[in-house]
Image (spheres, rainbow, N blue to C red):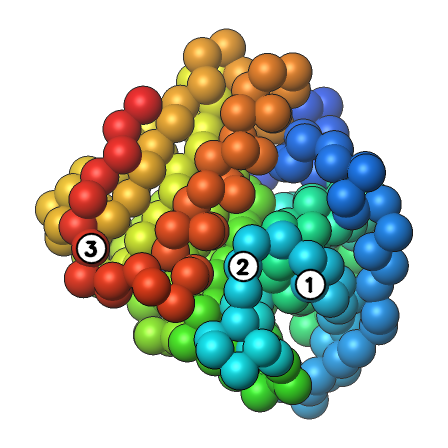
């Protein structure tokens, strides 16, 4: 089977036990604030396919409007290769982010290929289709009522992070990326495009997406002078547990607040290293 122009340099393409639990470790529980946020089902069309979206409306938090009291920043949440197999973990993450004051769109981008989880034998073939769907999702999100289209971010987990990078190459409305242990697509490594501010979260013992991907992304961002933060969690695998999970959630909250607030200067080149 011929490869597409966009290649994702995954290690052996199969789920391992730790990756099956990934979606449960991307955000710390904040049930007192987020437990009552229920999603509304919405959809858009991409490539002639209906793409479902679970919409989590912003609930309080510090991410205020743009001065008219109505518009809020918004975030696309992109799951990993496990798709909807462990969807409740992703929904917990969406509720946590919504409780901070951001509208969250949990996009079922695998609807484009009629999959519930990634079919690894078709990953390279399907990646460009999912990337197109994520770009369509950004356009759809920017047009939603109550959205500040100048303050859009993507939180991507594993494969979802790779799709976030690819989308941001050509979509200037993406102003911030949160990368949970994502692989760096070959296309980015070759073309070295300018990315938006990026938060990199990765485990040093990740056997699914080696930490070398995080380091390669860090070098790219440093080369460009792009605002970024990086945290490598010693001993953590493809998913975060315990204190690492709590620390990552706090970093996500700070990072989104810094880069999706209306007062953030887009030209900022400050770096935060841990």
- On screen, 274 above or below 139? above
* Foreground residue among 238 and 273: 273
* Residues at marks 1 and 2 touching, judged by CB atoms closer than 8 Å: yes
Distance in Å between CA atoms under marks 1 and 3:
26 Å
> Is disc 2 surrounded by few (<14), some (14 to 19) or many (20+) residues within 10 Å?
many
Return the disc, 1 or 3, that comes first in the chain's sequence. 1
**Label 2 residue SS:** loop
Q: Which residue is mark 3?
A: 268
* Residues at marks 1 and 3 touching, judged by CB atoms closer than 8 Å: no
- On screen, 151 above or below 259? below
Q: Relative to 116, is 25 on the left or the right?
A: left
x, y percent for residue 142: 53, 81
Residue 58: which disc? Answer: 1
Q: Which residue is mark 2?
A: 63
Look at 65% across and 19% down and name the residue there.
241
**Label 3 residue SS:** loop
- Corner quadrant of residue 28: top right
Look at 32% across and 53% down and name the residue there.
197
Residue 266: which disc? Answer: none
> Is disc 3 surrounded by few (<14), some (14 to 19) or many (20+) residues within 10 Å?
few
Distance in Å between CA atoms under marks 1 and 2:
9 Å
């Amino acid at each position: 089977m011929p490869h597409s122009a966009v290649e994702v340099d995954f290690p052996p393409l199969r789920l391992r036990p730790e990756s099956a639990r990934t979606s449960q470790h991307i955000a710390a529980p904040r049930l007192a604030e987020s437990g009552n946020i229920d999603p509304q089902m919405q959809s858009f069309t991409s490539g002639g396919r209906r793409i479902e979206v679970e919409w989590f409306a912003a609930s309080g938090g510090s991410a205020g409007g743009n001065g008219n009291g109505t518009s809020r920043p918004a975030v696309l949440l992109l799951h990993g290769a496990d798709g909807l197999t462990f969807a409740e973990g992703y929904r917990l993450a969406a509720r946590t982010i919504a409780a901070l004051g951001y509208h969250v769109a949990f996009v079922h981008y695998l609807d484009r290929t009629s999959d519930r989880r990634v079919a690894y034998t078709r990953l390279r073939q399907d990646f460009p289709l999912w990337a197109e769907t994520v770009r369509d999702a950004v356009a759809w999100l920017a047009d939603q009522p109550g959205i500040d289209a100048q303050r859009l971010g993507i939180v991507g987990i594993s494969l979802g992070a790779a799709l976030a990078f690819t989308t941001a190459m050509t979509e200037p409305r993406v102003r911030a990326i949160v990368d949970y242990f994502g692989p760096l697509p070959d296309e980015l490594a070759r073309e070295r495009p300018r990315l938006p501010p990026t938060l990199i979260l990765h485990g040093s013992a990740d056997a699914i997406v080696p930490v070398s991907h995080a380091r390669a992304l860090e070098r790219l961002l440093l080369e460009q002078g792009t605002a970024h933060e990086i945290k490598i969690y010693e001993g953590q695998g493809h998913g975060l547990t315990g204190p690492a999970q709590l620390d990552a959630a706090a970093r996500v909250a700070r990072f989104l607040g810094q880069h999706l607030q209306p007062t953030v200067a887009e030209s900022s080149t400050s770096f935060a290293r841990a």
